Amino acid sequence: MSRTGVDMARSVRPSMARAVLRGLGPHAGAPGQRAERLLGEGLPVPERLHARLTAALAARGWPALLAAAERLLTDDPLLGALPGCADLAQLLDRARLVEPWFHAGHRTVRTLDGDGLTVRHVPLLGTVPGPAESLLVCAIDVLATAGPAGRTARVEIRADGAAGRPEEVLRVGAARVAGWRLHWVAPPSVVGAARPLETVRARFARDPARPWRLGETADLLGLSPRTLQRGLAEAGTSFRAELLGVRLEVAGQLTARTVLPLADVAAAAGFTDHAHLSRRFRARFGCPPSEFRRAGGH
């Protein structure tokens, strides 16, 4: 406990707490008053208190969770950039970078296939997310993917060993939400990943600082350079684009999760120097890594 009596062990991003509080309005009760007081004093809202408020919001139904998610996407610059991504692949890259600041005790594992997105919601720091927390994250996914996918997804929640719509899961009072699937009737605006693309990304991620070359990489995969190029082109991408994308993802994770000097982040991710990293980072995400790191603080 701190001198203020607030459990500072783990807290949520202020914008997350405010979105839930605004959704509850006068129904927030004493827990909401405490959260409002903390926010007013510039203090973080403890994760446990936020979980109680999110459960109260979920009790008001799926539309209440969607409304809170919409407020969050509107008010927070980190999440607000998600719906404006060019396609779902870029959105998932961006989501991986910002997730550590919003879901301190848990994480999502996302798999994008041609007509849908499958998400597993799993513990990260020993805390199993409650069903209301999971459904709020799902609501964020629904709204964030609507723009890049070109339409709103149908939602299937996987809870208590079965699957159903969010409204059904809330009605039966599921004890555990394992994940969800978003499904678009029309294919989303991103080409499905071919096997060469997945393999190339995995290779780059193992050693992003390596001076990768097309011919060398093709040899490692047992392919000709032309076959590798063709496979990547069929997936709507290129060798250089994927190498840059992986390096930016690694740089973003190091920026978000560590206090390494940004020059060291640049070197570890395969950029020639801090200026090179900043230039590429700004072009992809709209801000330099220094601003990205500052925005993640409470």
Image: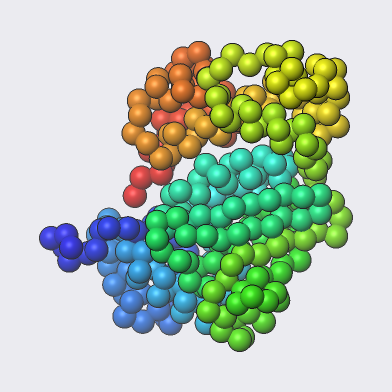
Residue 33 lies in quadrant? bottom left
Q: Position of residue 44 (x, y in %)?
A: 31, 58
In this view of the protein, can residue 15 be seen by the observer?
no
Asked which quadrant contains residue 35, the reply is bottom left
Q: Quadrant of the N terminus?
A: bottom left
Name which residue lies at 72% across and 67% down.
Answer: 155
- Give 42 or 115, whichever is nearer the viewer: 115
Q: Report the residue at 65% width, 44% height from top.
A: 91
Q: Viewed as shown, does residue 169 lie left or right of 190?
A: left
Which residue occupies the extreme bottom position in the image?
172
Q: On screen, 167 above or below 14? A: below
Residue 65 x, y percent position in the rendering: 57, 71
Nearer to the camera, 279 or 127: 127
Question: Which colour assignment does the render follow?
Answer: rainbow
* Numbered-mark total: 0
Residue 266 on image: x %, y %: 46, 21
Compared with 54, 230 (above or below) is above
Q: Is residue 271 above or below residue 16?
A: above
- Say which residue appears at 61% left-offset and 86% top-offset: 172
Residue 255 can be seen in this image: yes
Q: Residue furthest left?
A: 3
x then y, percent, for residue 278:
49, 23
Residue shown at 35%/69% (left/top)? 48
